[in-house]
């Protein structure tokens, strides 16, 4: 995407600070600012808040202090003695470690750092309070397997011993923990079995029990949460994709036995990331509910949070939830709830900025005797979408922690300079709310036209597996997405979801077989690249769902005004340690290829003939850099539409008005390159069809290098194109005499046209009018030229398209 007008941002070295606070948002309403400031001053809470916290709009802000290491993903809890504890992930450069702090008077003081020399990576921690101290849980990766570790922290300063849970599967992540009366339950997400599910393990007096699956074995479930009730019961919740819906499910644990799971929500939106809290014997839950416009899938348009109390198998919500808190166009993520010492309800979330390239602001609401408070914005220094955990010590105060960072809020002058990402955690102390019991009404979600079943139907998600018997053996058809962005990419940060959510969408809603997240190289630094690699490995389900470590190499400026074009760089090794920023020393594709000479990778050009912004931000592909093995395929179609040729069906609106850089132009130059399609930034369009031997990283890579690929404009379709023993993508010796071709296709709608191109000109056209076709055609007079290439394109009644890779015949 286009690097816009530069916006300067401080780049100097900031003093290290272990215990830090940062300026809060100056954009709060005057009423809420004055009221909150008066309350804070009256209670003495301002002692831990800098003077710049409530800077007037347009006023100056205090300089931000940064920790020496990247700090992210905080979690909080209180022990029975009333002490607040916080755990978070700290990253010196690449592999991080878990740090546990005690929170005292609004400051967090290091008590323990958890690490293991055996681990190649460590994931996001969570914790629960004990009688004194806390138990912290987190995933760690050892020998290509993510496992669950936990440790008891008592604050004595002695080294805490890590214990491991015997987990099945290679991806065990998102652990949560709750303790009560000497019993501790740890829950996590695992890819053991045929679907991802939630597993539970009981720990009693340090003794680790046997893990058990508590969710349905035939559905993917994610993002668990758990609470302990005073009477010894536990309750857990998670989100799950079932019957073409993504909703929240829950289950009770009574006397150490998990009961039958139950459906808690049934909204049409994508409901995910529940969080539980307890008030007495009441169980409360917050969750997020998202939707996407039109045919989009990973371009968020609606981001709501919801709060409700569990009433049997029903949910009751506080009044004015969608009038005061989760209002339209307020983009909210990752809610957290809890109750202060007086019993007042508190809700936190991250608020997406109005500008789509910007970040998120930590926000709070309380529900007291007067109902919902005004929104409380904790900081004007934006951060990521990471949750804002809450703790409620017996002092009566409310403690909130939030992540903040210095990620660029637009394209800026850091391009090509490998910005050292700065990220810290701020702790804020607030007074408790005057108690008020929420007025509850049955949960009623706002009306929506969003429909997951219609999206699944439109992309033909349940298309059955196709096979193809070729001269080299039987191949299977696998569909994937090799061009998607998350919130790491600056150009559409607020609308593109975090990686774990994106993978779930692709795995469940579209039911694709493989995926690569391709955030921009200029938005990475070592820590962000490590996070990208970790979530790639965490979401890999062998033989079910294959993930590739990848990035976009975005050459928008170079020796020419337009640069070398945008290409996706896909790595075979999910532990690849180096990423590439095209703006560093004005890299060329050849320089990247030479630097990666000992690495398995694939380069994929896209936006081939884009002319937007006169080529300054989205330049056309520089076709002087070609390599049949390293750059075997190109995106003929993506969210910007088709780059097949000038004047083609569904041509990209921003396509160049002249020939020269479309895919047919590359073939005319003698370039041998195959075809795929991809979405790009949640466009909901474009899929790569790959004919491979099996569903592994190696097999998919081999098939793409062989160009045994095709692309579709959106839905899954089956497409075979062959000539004797040659299949799409092959380069073979030209036979003497006529050449017989066979086209087989299966589409969700009737195919209104099949065309076969020879050297970019249509030589055969048919109008079958059926959804499944088999068409034979013979070229009685092949061209007597050095290179002759043929490919086919099908078009359905609803204007969807599919293109095969060509077959090349050489003298």
Image (cartoon, rainbow, N blue to C red):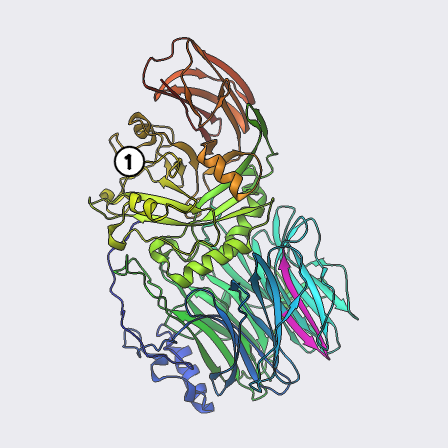
Secondary structure, magenta segment, majority class: strand
Which of the two residues, 351 or 133, is positioned nearer the viewer here? Answer: 133
Q: Could you tell me if residue 374 is visible in this image?
A: no
Q: Which residues are magenta?
A: 177-190
Q: Quadrant of residue 11?
A: bottom left
Location of residue 85 in the rendering, given as x and y in whole percent from the top left corner: 55, 80
Which of the two residues, 330 or 580, is positioned nearer the viewer here? Answer: 580
Which of the two residues, 202 or 659, is positioned nearer the viewer here? Answer: 202
Q: Which residue is mark 1?
A: 623
Assign the C terminus to one quadrant of the image: top left
**Is 345 positioned to the left or the right of 355 in the image?**
right
Residue situated furthest left in the rendering: 560
Q: Is residue 345 magenta?
A: no
Tell me what residue is drawn at x 29 percent, y 74 percent: 13
Location of residue 271 in the rendering, given as x and y in whole percent from the top left corner: 58, 56
Q: Quadrant of residue 125?
A: bottom right
Give the answer, above or below, for where 722 lies relative to 228: above
Give the answer, above or below, for where 361 lies relative to 800: below
Tag 1: Cα neighbours inside 10 Å, few (<14), some, or many (≥20)? some
Tell me what residue is drawn at x 46 percent, y 57 percent: 532
Location of residue 256 in the rendering, given as x and y in whole percent from the top left corner: 78, 69
Which of the two residues, 197 or 589, is positioned nearer the viewer here? Answer: 589
Location of residue 236 in the rendering, given as x and y in whole percent from the top left corner: 67, 65
Give the answer, above or below, for where 205 lies relative to 598: below
Dot 1: element: loop
């Amino acid at each position: 995407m286009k690097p816009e007008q530069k916006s300067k941002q401080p780049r100097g070295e900031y003093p290290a600070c272990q215990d830090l606070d940062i300026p809060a948002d100056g954009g709060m309403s005057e009423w809420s600012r004055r009221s909150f400031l008066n309350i804070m001053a009256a209670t003495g809470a301002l002692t831990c808040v800098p003077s710049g916290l409530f800077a007037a709009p347009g006023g100056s802000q205090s300089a931000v202090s940064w920790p020496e290491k990247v700090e992210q993903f905080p979690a909080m809890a209180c022990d029975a003695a009333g002490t607040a504890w916080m755990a978070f992930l700290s990253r010196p450069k690449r592999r991080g470690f878990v740090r546990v702090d005690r929170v005292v008077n609004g400051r967090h003081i290091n008590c323990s750092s958890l690490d293991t020399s055996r681990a190649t990576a460590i994931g996001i921690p969570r914790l629960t309070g004990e009688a004194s101290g806390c138990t912290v849980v987190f995933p760690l990766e050892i020998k290509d397997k993510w496992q669950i570790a936990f440790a008891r922290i008592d604050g004595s300063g002695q080294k805490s011993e890590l214990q491991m849970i015997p987990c099945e599967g290679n991806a065990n992540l998102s652990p949560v923990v709750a303790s009560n009366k000497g019993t501790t339950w740890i829950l996590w997400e695992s890819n053991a079995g045929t679907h991802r599910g939630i597993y539970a393990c009981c720990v009693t007096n340090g003794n680790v029990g046997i893990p058990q699956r508590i969710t349905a074995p035939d559905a993917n479930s994610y993002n668990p949460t758990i609470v302990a009730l005073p009477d010894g019961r536990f309750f857990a919740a998670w989100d799950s994709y079932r019957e073409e819906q993504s909703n929240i499910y829950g289950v009770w644990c009574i006397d150490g036995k998990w009961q039958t799971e139950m459906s808690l929500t049934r909204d049409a939106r994508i409901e995910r990331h529940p969080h539980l809290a307890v008030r007495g014997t009441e169980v409360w839950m917050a969750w997020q509910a998202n939707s996407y416009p039109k045919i989009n899938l990973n371009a968020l348009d609606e981001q709501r949070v919801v709060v409700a109390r569990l009433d049997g198998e029903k949910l009751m919500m506080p009044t004015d939830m969608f009038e005061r808190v989760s209002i339209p166009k307020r983009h909210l993520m990752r809610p957290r709830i809890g109750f202060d010492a007086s019993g007042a309800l508190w809700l936190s979330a991250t608020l997406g900025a109005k500008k789509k390239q910007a970040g998120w602001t930590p926000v709070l609401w309380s529900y007291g005797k007067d109902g919902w408070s005004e929104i409380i914005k904790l900081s004007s220094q934006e951060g990521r979408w990471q949750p804002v955990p809450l703790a409620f010590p017996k002092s009566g105060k409310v403690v909130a922690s939030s992540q903040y960072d210095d990620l660029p809020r637009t394209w800026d002058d850091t391009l090509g300079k490998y910005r050292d990402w700065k990220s810290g955690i701020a702790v804020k102390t607030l007074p408790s709310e005057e108690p008020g019991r929420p007025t509850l009404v049955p949960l009623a979600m706002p009306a929506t036209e969003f429909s997951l079943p219609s999206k699944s139907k439109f992309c033909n998600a349940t298309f059955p597996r196709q096979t193809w018997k070729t001269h080299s053996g039987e191949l299977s058809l696998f569909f994937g997405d090799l061009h998607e962005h998350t919130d790491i990419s600056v150009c559409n940060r607020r609308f593109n979801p975090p990686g774990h959510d994106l993978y779930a969408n692709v795995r469940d809603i579209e039911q694709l077989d493989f995926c690569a997240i391709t955030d921009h190289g200029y938005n990475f630094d070592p820590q962000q690249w490590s996070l990208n690699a970790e979530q790639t490995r965490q979401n890999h389900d062998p033989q079910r769902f294959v993930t590739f470590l990848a990035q976009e190499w975005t050459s928008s400026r170079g020796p020419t005004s337009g640069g070398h074009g945008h290409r996706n760089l896909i790595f075979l090794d999910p532990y690849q340690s180096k990423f590439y920023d095209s703006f560093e020393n004005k890299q060329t594709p050849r320089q990247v290829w030479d630097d990666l000479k000992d690495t398995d990778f694939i380069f994929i050009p896209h936006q081939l003939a884009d002319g937007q912004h006169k080529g300054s931000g989205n330049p056309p592909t520089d076709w002087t850099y070609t390599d049949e093995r390293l750059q075997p395929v190109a995106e003929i179609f993506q969210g910007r539409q088709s780059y097949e040729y000038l004047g083609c069906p569904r041509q990209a609106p921003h396509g160049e008005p002249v020939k020269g850089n479309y895919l047919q132009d590359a073939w005319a130059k003698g370039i041998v390159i195959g075809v795929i399609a991809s979405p790009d930034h949640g466009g909901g369009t474009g899929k790569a069809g790959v004919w491979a031997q099996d569903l592994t990283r190696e097999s998919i890579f081999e098939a793409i290098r062989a160009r045994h690929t095709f692309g579709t404009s959106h839905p899954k379709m089956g497409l075979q194109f062959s000539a004797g023993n040659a299949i799409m993508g092959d380069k073979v010796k030209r036979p003497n005499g006529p050449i017989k071709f066979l086209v087989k296709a299966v589409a969700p709608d009737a195919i209104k046209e099949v065309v076969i191109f020879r050297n970019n000109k249509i030589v055969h056209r048919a109008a079958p009018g059926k959804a499944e076709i088999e068409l034979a055609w013979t070229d009685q007079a092949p061209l007597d030229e050095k290179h002759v290439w043929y490919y086919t394109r099908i078009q359905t009644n609803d204007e969807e398209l599919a293109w095969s890779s060509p077959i090349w015949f050489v003298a």
